[in-house]
Image: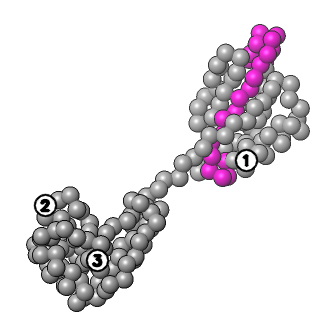
């Protein structure tokens, strides 16, 4: 099978058929092929006889390893496995609250936080306090606690409330 196929993806590009040169002997593997060492010329003839491609799998081993198989199928399976193995990364989104936030603003921010959670992200809620608000820290946590209660059917707290200087922080994640 003399057709030349090249992949655009660097990691998944292999030399095939006539691109393979400068080897005296190679080890061949593949379906319906017994693993054996033979000359490169004989390996190419065997692949051509079976109407499959000779694919260079590991050029650094001694002797180099070649696979007899369908190149397009190999690339397809590798892409599929790479996609399957890719883990979904959840991003951390932030929502800022203030001590004297209006009820409607709090509801709007809760709605946005629900969207983030439904998209699979975690939400970091930050309550910022300024000046005299810092003296009544416990009273001022009312707005962040009210925010958490608004989202209790959608989200759960991943961490407890943490005081970080002039901020109070909590991380919310989607309920399962």
Asked if 156 appears above or below 41 in the picture, the reply is above
Comes first in the chain, label 2 or label 1: 2
> Distance of mark 3 from mark 1, alpha carbons?
54 Å
Q: Is residue 131 magenta?
A: yes
> Distance of mark 2 from mark 1, alpha carbons?
57 Å
Badge 1 marks a residue whose secondary structure is helix
Comes first in the chain, label 3 or label 1: 3
Residue 111 x/y as whole percent = 79, 46
Kindly tell me whether residue 73 is visible in this rendering: no
Q: Residue at x 23, y 76 (%)?
A: 30
Asked if 143 appears above or below 29 in the picture, the reply is above
Residues tagged 2 and 1 counted as in contact (Cβ below 8 A): no
Residue 143 x/y as whole percent = 79, 28
Badge 3 marks a residue whose secondary structure is helix
Badge 2 marks a residue whose secondary structure is loop
Crowding around mark 2 (Cα neighbors within 10 Å: few <14, some 14 to 19, many 20+) is few
Q: Which residues are magenta?
A: 117-139
Q: Which residue is mark 1?
A: 114
Crowding around mark 1 (Cα neighbors within 10 Å: few <14, some 14 to 19, many 20+) is some
Q: Residue at x 13, y 64 (%)?
A: 63
Closest to the camera, between mark 3 and mark 1, is 3
> In the picture, residue 106 is in which quadrant?
top right
Q: Is residue 162 magenta?
A: no
Q: Residue at x 69, y 47 (%)?
A: 116
Closest to the camera, between mark 2 and mark 1, is 2
Q: Which mark is residue 62?
A: 2
Q: Which mark is residue 17?
A: 3
> Distance of mark 2 from mark 3, alpha carbons?
19 Å
Residue 72 x/y as whole percent = 39, 77
């Amino acid at each position: 099978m003399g057709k030349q196929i090249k992949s655009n993806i660097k990691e998944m590009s292999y030399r095939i058929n006539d691109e393979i040169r400068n080897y005296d002997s190679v080890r061949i593997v593949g379906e319906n092929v017994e693993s054996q060492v033979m000359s490169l010329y004989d390996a190419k003839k065997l692949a051509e006889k079976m109407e499959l491609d000779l694919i260079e799998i590991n050029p650094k081993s001694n002797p180099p390893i070649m696979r007899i198989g369908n190149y397009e199928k190999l690339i397809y399976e590798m892409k599929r496995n790479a996609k399957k193995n890719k883990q979904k990364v959840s991003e951390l989104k932030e929502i800022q609250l203030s001590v004297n936030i209006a009820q409607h603003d709090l509801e709007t921010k809760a709605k946005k936080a629900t969207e983030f959670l439904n998209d699979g992200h975690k939400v970091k809620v930050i309550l910022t306090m300024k000046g005299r608000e810092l003296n009544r820290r416990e009273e001022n946590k009312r707005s962040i606690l009210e925010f958490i209660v608004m989202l209790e059917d959608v989200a759960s707290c991943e961490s407890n409330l943490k005081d970080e200087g002039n901020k109070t922080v909590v991380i919310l994640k989607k309920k399962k």
